[in-house]
């Protein structure tokens, strides 16, 4: 396996339930975990996966997973859920009601880390982000900068899976497809790394199956970089008509998000992140393996449009 810009060979190996049978109750939330659930908990193979969301429990149980429900704020419940697990995939699910995001996420990360140590989990895969190495100027990614420091202090081996911009984020701009537009505050012609959440799940599955030692970082992107104009072109092919990028000024983003119902703190953080991407600040640290998923943005857009 090569650790290079072209490395997608990690996806070509399948991971069966026997390999993952001891990677139990690994908290996989929402879209991030879907690829892992499909690979690690196929009912015909009988392998246990795990879930930490009550609303997903029934579907996951039907797929052959062991279900352990625990609130991310409840350290004792998390520890009980993680007992017996050799590996766990963890992340900080966003709390959009928070008005002190970094403080709240720091508390939650420390709660999870304490539970990991209390349950004697030997290896954790932590969903992080491009730009998490930076101490400022990255908006909500700052919480992951803090979380990496927190999880690095656990006794467990830790793999930080630093994912690129989620391709699925473009779903929030599809409301304007009828008008032939793709609204964004990102620079229309600036290409940057993106990744499908399916490929995040697949990468997490591989990392859990392989186990870990020490602390390491994997950088994860899609097959190549895309600009918003590239995304608009792909969307046009999906819907069968021309789509143009509608680029808004960065400085209008906070007001726009608040007008859509987001609180001031989150709106400010997303504007800061957008500026960081536009300015080229939010980028890879380098010096770590760069994995590339195989799912392209057109495939993701096809799914998003079909689900509307």
Image (spheres, helix red, strand yellow):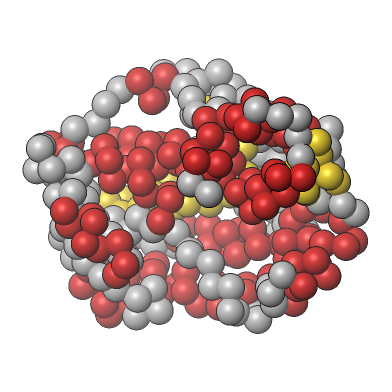
The image quadrant of residue 202 is: top left
Question: With 266 as the anchor, is 96 left or right in this view?
Answer: left
Quadrant placement of the N terminus: top left
Question: With 10 as the anchor, is 184 left or right in this view?
Answer: right
- Tell me, yes or no, if residue 241 can be seen here: yes
Which residue lies at the image location 88% right of the left edge and 62% below the top edge?
A: 252
- Tell me, yes or no, if residue 289 can be seen here: no
> Where is residue 32 shown, x and y percent of the image?
43, 49
Question: With 211 as the anchor, is 225 left or right in this view?
Answer: right
> Where is residue 143 shown, x and y percent of the image?
60, 64
* 89, 236: nearer the viewer: 236
> Where is residue 57 shown, x and y percent of the image?
24, 63
**145 is higher (above) or lower (below) than 218:** below
**163 is higher (above) or lower (below) than 291:** below
Which residue lies at the image location 21% right of the left edge and 72% below the top edge?
A: 80
> Where is residue 266 shown, x and y percent of the image?
69, 70
**127 is higher (above) or lower (below) than 1:** below
Question: With 234 as the anchor, is 275 left or right in this view?
Answer: right
Which residue lies at the image location 53% right of the left edge and 62% below the top edge?
A: 147
């Amino acid at each position: 396996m090569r650790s290079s810009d072209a490395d997608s060979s990690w996806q070509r190996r399948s991971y069966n339930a026997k390999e993952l049978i001891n990677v139990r109750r690994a908290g996989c939330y929402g879209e991030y975990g879907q690829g892992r659930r499909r690979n690690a908990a196929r009912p015909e193979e009988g392998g246990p996966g795990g879930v930490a969301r009550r609303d997903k429990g029934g579907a996951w149980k039907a797929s052959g997973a062991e279900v352990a429900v625990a609130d991310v704020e409840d350290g004792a419940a998390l520890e009980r859920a993680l007992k017996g697990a050799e590996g766990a995939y963890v992340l900080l699910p966003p709390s959009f009601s928070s008005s002190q995001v970094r403080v709240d996420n720091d508390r939650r990360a420390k709660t999870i880390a304490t539970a990991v140590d209390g349950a004697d989990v030997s290896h954790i895969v932590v969903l992080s982000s491009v730009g998490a190495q930076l101490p400022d100027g990255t908006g909500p990614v700052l919480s992951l900068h803090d979380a990496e420091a927190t999880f690095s202090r656990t006794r467990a081996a830790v793999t930080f899976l630093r994912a690129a911009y989620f391709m699925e984020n473009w779903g929030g701009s599809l409301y304007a497809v009828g008008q032939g537009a793709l609204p964004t505050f990102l620079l229309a012609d600036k290409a940057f790394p993106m990744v499908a959440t399916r490929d995040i799940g697949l990468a997490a599955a591989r990392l859990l199956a392989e186990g870990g030692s020490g602390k390491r970082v994997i950088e994860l992107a899609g097959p190549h970089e895309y600009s918003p104009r590239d995304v608009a072109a792909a969307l046009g092919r999906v819907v069968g008509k021309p789509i143009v990028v509608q680029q808004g000024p960065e400085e209008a983003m906070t007001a726009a998000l608040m007008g859509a119902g987001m609180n001031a703190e989150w709106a400010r953080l997303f504007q800061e992140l957008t500026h960081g991407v536009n300015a080229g600040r939010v980028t890879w640290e380098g010096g770590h393996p760069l994995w590339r998923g195989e799912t392209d943005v057109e495939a993701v857009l096809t799914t998003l449009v079909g689900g509307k």
